[in-house]
Image (cartoon, grey):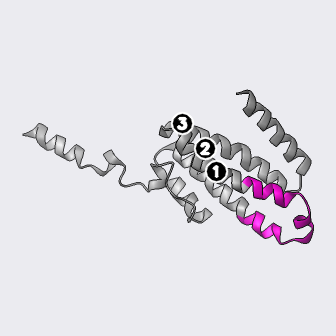
C-alpha cells in the first residue's frame, strides 16, 4: 500500500512534470513574441533549467535591441545609412532562426544549443550596428558567415 501511495504522489507531483514553470521555461518552441523584455527577464529568472534561462535572457535582450532599433530608425542620419537595412535583416534572420530551429533540431537540447549560439552571435553584431560601428559589425558578420560555411 505504501508503494502505491508513493507512486501516486510522485506521479501527481507538479515538480515531476514542470507544471509550476511557465512554458517558456520548458519548451523552446513556445510563442514568446508577445512578451515584453521585462516579462521575459522575470520568466528567465524563474526557470529551473539554466539553458532555458539563458535562452530567455537572450530573447529579452533581442527584444531590447529591436525596441532600440525602432527608436533609432526615426532618426534622419540613421535612416539614410546602411544601419537600418542591416538591422532589418537582423530582425528577419532571428525570426527565421526561431522557426527553423524547430525543423532542423528535433531535440530540445539541439534547439537550445542552436538558438543560444545564434542569439549570442547576432545580438552582438546588432548592438555594434546600433552603436554605429558598421565596419566592425560587417566584418564580424562576414567572419561568422565564413565560419558557418566551413562547419
Circle 2 residue:
115
Q: Residue furthest left?
A: 1
Residue 71 covered by magenta stretch: yes
Quick one: quadrant of the C terminus? top right
Position of residue 110 in the picture relative to residue 80 (left or right): left
Examine the image and state in which quarter residue 113 appears: top right
Q: Is residue 121 left or right of residue 10?
A: right
Please tell me whether mark 3 sits on a helix, a strand or a loop: helix
Q: Which of marks 2 and 3 precedes in the sequence?
A: 3
* Residue 18 x/y as whole percent: 37, 49
Q: Which residues are magenta?
A: 67-90
Tell me what residue is drawn at x 82 percent, y 36 percent.
Answer: 143
Which is nearer the N-term, disc 1 or disc 3? 1
Using the image, tell me which numbered label, if any, was put on residue 96.
1
- State the image coordinates of residue 42 (x, y, percent, origin top left): 54, 60
Which tag is nearer the camera, tag 1 or tag 3?
1
Contact between marks 1 and 3 (CB within 8 A): the answer is no
In this figure, which residue is indicated by the disc labeled 3?
110
Amino acid at each position: 500500500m505504501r508503494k502505491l501511495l508513493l507512486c501516486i504522489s510522485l506521479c501527481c507531483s507538479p515538480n515531476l512534470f514542470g507544471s509550476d514553470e511557465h512554458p517558456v521555461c520548458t519548451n523552446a518552441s513556445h510563442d514568446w513574441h508577445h512578451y515584453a523584455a521585462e516579462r521575459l527577464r522575470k520568466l528567465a529568472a524563474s526557470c529551473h533549467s539554466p539553458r532555458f534561462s539563458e535562452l530567455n535572457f537572450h530573447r529579452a535582450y533581442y527584444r531590447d535591441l529591436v525596441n532600440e532599433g525602432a527608436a533609432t530608425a526615426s532618426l534622419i542620419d540613421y535612416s539614410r545609412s546602411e544601419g537600418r537595412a542591416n538591422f532589418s535583416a537582423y530582425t528577419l534572420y532571428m525570426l527565421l532562426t526561431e522557426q527553423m530551429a524547430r525543423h532542423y533540431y528535433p531535440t530540445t537540447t539541439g534547439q537550445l544549443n542552436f538558438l543560444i549560439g545564434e542569439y549570442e552571435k547576432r545580438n552582438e553584431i546588432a548592438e555594434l550596428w546600433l552603436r554605429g560601428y558598421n565596419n566592425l559589425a560587417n566584418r564580424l558578420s562576414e567572419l561568422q558567415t565564413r565560419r558557418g560555411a566551413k562547419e
